[in-house]
Every structure is written in structure tokens, then in C-alpha cells.
Amino acid sequence: MPSWRATAALAALPVLALAIAAFPTASAFVAAAVSGGVAGAALHRRYPDAFDRVFDRSPSAPGDEGVGTADG
């Protein structure tokens, strides 16, 4: 009968293999999230009201109906 340490080590092997296999994807995701956050912060610092200007002031097209009005 193997010791509890040997059993724990054998049970940890699949978890270790999964962690090693997922490391490149996880590190790429973290790098993309960090660089996106830095770029977003820089853009927001340079143009603080850009989001409001784009979405609050965008006029609807002439003759544009509300959602569901063309169905009835």
C-alpha cells in the first residue's frame, strides 16, 4: 500500500499537467487584459467625454422607427 504522500503526488499529476497546458492561454489572456486596460485608461485620459459624445449625441436616421413598431 503506497503512503499518503505518494498517493497525493500521483493525484496531483493531472492537475499539474492541466496547469502547465493552460499556462500559455492564461498568460496571453492576462497580457491582453492588462494592455487593453492601459490603452483604455490612456484614451479616457486623453478624451474623457468621447464615449458620451458618440452615444448620447448620435441622431437616429430619418424615418427610423422604434423597436417593434413595424411588426404590428
Image (cartoon, helix red, strand yellow):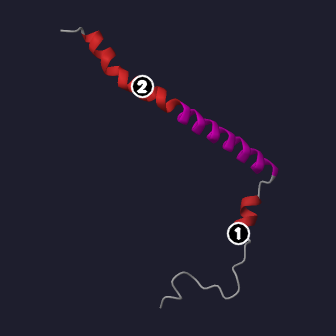
Q: Is residue 33 magenta?
A: yes
Q: Mark 2 sits on what residue?
A: 17
Q: Main secondary structure of the magenta part?
A: helix
Quadrant for the N terminus, please: top left
Label 2 Cα crowd, 10 Å radius (few <14 / some 14-19 / many 20+): few
In the picture of the structure, the residue carrying the numbered disc 1 is 56
- Magenta part of the chain: 24-46
Q: Residue at x 71, y 41 (%)?
A: 38
Secondary structure, mark 2, is: helix
What is the quadrant of residue 52 in the picture? bottom right
Image coordinates for residue 49, horizontal then vertical, percent: 76, 58
Q: Residue at x 73, y 44 (%)?
A: 39
Q: 22 or 35: which is nearer to us?
A: 22
Q: Does residue 24 appear to the left or right of 35 in the view shown?
A: left
| Residue 17 horizontal side relative to residue 26, left or right | left
Above or below 50: residue 19: above
Q: Position of residue 8 (x, y in %)?
A: 30, 16
Q: Are marks 1 and 2 in contact (CB under 8 Å)?
A: no
> Is the residue marked by circle 1 packed among few (<14), some (14-19), or many (20+) residues within 10 Å?
few
Amino acid type, callout 2: Ala
**Residue at x 42%, y 29% (from the top left corner):** 18
Measured as percent of width and height from the top left, residue 62 is found at 71, 86
Residue 21, numbered label:
none
Q: CA distance from mark 1 to mark 2?
A: 50 Å
Q: From the viewer's perspective, is residue 36 above or below residue 52?
A: above
Mark before the other along the chain sequence, 1 or 2: 2
Amino acid at dot 1 = Asp
- The percent position of residue 3, horizontal first and vertical second, equals 24, 8
Q: Secondary structure at mark 1?
A: helix
The answer to whether residue 47 is above or below residue 11 is: below
